[in-house]
Amino acid sequence: MEKEKILNAACDHFRAIVSEQLDRAEKMKIREVVDFTSLDRVVIGFCGGDGIGPVITHEAMRVLGELLKEKIAAGRVELYPIEGLTIENRLAVGKAIPDDTLAEIKKCHVILKGPTETPYGTGMESANVAMRRELDLYANVRPVKVPGESIDWTFFRENTEGEYVLGSRGFDVPGMLAFDFKVTTDEGTRRIARAAFEYAKKTGKKSVSIVTKANIMKKTDAKFSAICHEVAADYPGITAEDWYIDIMTANLLNKNRRSQFEVFVLPNLYGDIITDEAAEIGGGVGTAGSANIGDRYAMFEAIHGSAPRMIERGHGAYANPTSIMRACVLMLDHIGFTAEARRLSAALDRCTDGDCRVVMTGRPDGATAAEFAEAVMRVM
Ligand code: IPM
Ligand code: MG
């Protein structure tokens, strides 16, 4: 009897999620694409987030304000502060993104977001995951460059489905077992594959690595790979190669091989894991930016978390804003401000690694986020 009850609950649960996912897959077929590069006026919203988030976001916005001051004065750009994406507020209203905050976010074209905390054990969904879903930001684009080693990688991580889409909707039989669900849709795969191959074509890259675990995940990852190959057929000059995620994590550590890889396309969770590894190879997770791109909106963020321990130690002012400033470069490129993107990127190179290096340690023996921003503004 007990088992019968469990089975009924499981069937109801599965029926509900399959129904929702079918609706999502259907909705995905309708695409309304905004050409961000041809907007007369761009609204850049910014949310500070939690922990060190407000510190680094504030410095990034200062730099953007300076870089875009003529465009702001001419009304071509608006920098729009968004309140309410804080852990306190999210817990108070019991939502990953409070409704009024989401409405504010939707008034913008692009968002710069500081890291947000996901309270462990409360069951609350991550604000990141919720925002990616609500704004349908399906492409997580993470570039990693190590010029000295000829490494120039760009990861296209599927950002709205896979292991994440039902991450808060698993099925638990307490004391016995638990299930989580992974969902891969044809359209969801097609659009991320298209983004990766288009990028490869535009930038003259010769290969796209499709990274899955299709030998084990025989439904979802096999579909992912098959659809990537379908898309690849439209790009004759570019080779599409299958790799398994385990050996790819090893390849990235292999100094004799790693520079041969160029563009990667991969499901959500593998993309999450491997981009931290790649960022570490590229100088640390504190240094890489991340773009979350959809057809209508885009959100840019640091790849690292909110570092609550730095705040507890009273070291928040010493947080390193490089990662979120790299995200600003991606944002400027995305909205077609290529010259400004190059200026900021070059200034960051100089201040992190070059002749104007600012030493950031995350502690009072290093520079503050504000000092770093000032150095960037001096040389940009
Ligand atoms: C990232 C982060 C997020 C993720 C977390 C904060 C939900 O690790 O952007 O890579 O898992 O996607
Ligand atoms: Mg991650």
Image (tube, rainbow, N blue to C red):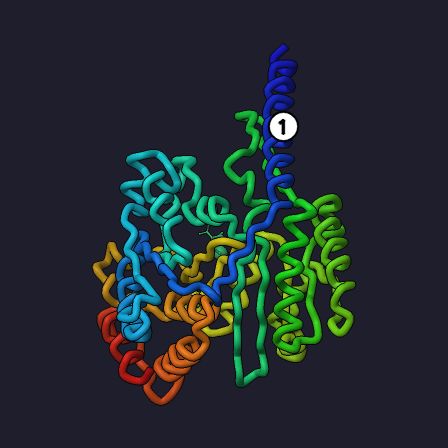
**Where is 73 relative to 80, above or below?**
below
Q: Position of residue 227 (x, y in %)?
A: 74, 54
- Left or right: 146 as drawn, with respect to 222: left
Nearer to me, 98 or 176: 98
Q: Position of residue 351 (x, y in %)?
A: 35, 81
**Where is 12 relative to 87, above or below?**
above
Q: Residue at x 64, y 67 (%)?
A: 198
Q: Which residue is drawn at 70% across and 72% down?
A: 207
- Tell me where residue 68 sits by quadrant: bottom left
Q: Which amino acid does label 1 sit on?
A: Phe
Residue 58 appears in the rendering: yes
- Tell me where residue 121 sits by quadrant: top left
- Left or right: 64 as drawn, with respect to 7: left
Characterize the local packing of mark 1: few (<14), some (14-19) or many (20 or more) Cα atoms within 10 angstroms: some
Nearer to me, 9 or 188: 188
Q: Where is residue 194 in the image (x, y as percent from the top left)?
A: 66, 60
Q: Residue at x 52, y 48 (%)?
A: 136
> Which residue is farthest top?
1
Q: How many numbered callouts?
A: 1
Q: Where is residue 18 in the image (x, y as percent from the top left)?
A: 64, 32
Q: Circle 1 sits on which residue?
A: 14
- Left or right: 75 as drawn, with respect to 234: left
Specify the quadrant that holds the C terminus.
bottom left
Q: Residue at x 63, y 10 (%)?
A: 1
Asked if ligand 1 lies within 8 A of label 1, the reply is no
- Left or right: 195 as drawn, with respect to 369: right
Residue 307 appears in the rendering: no
Nearer to me, 148 or 104: 104
Q: What element carries label 1?
A: helix
**Where is 144 relative to 210, above or below?**
below
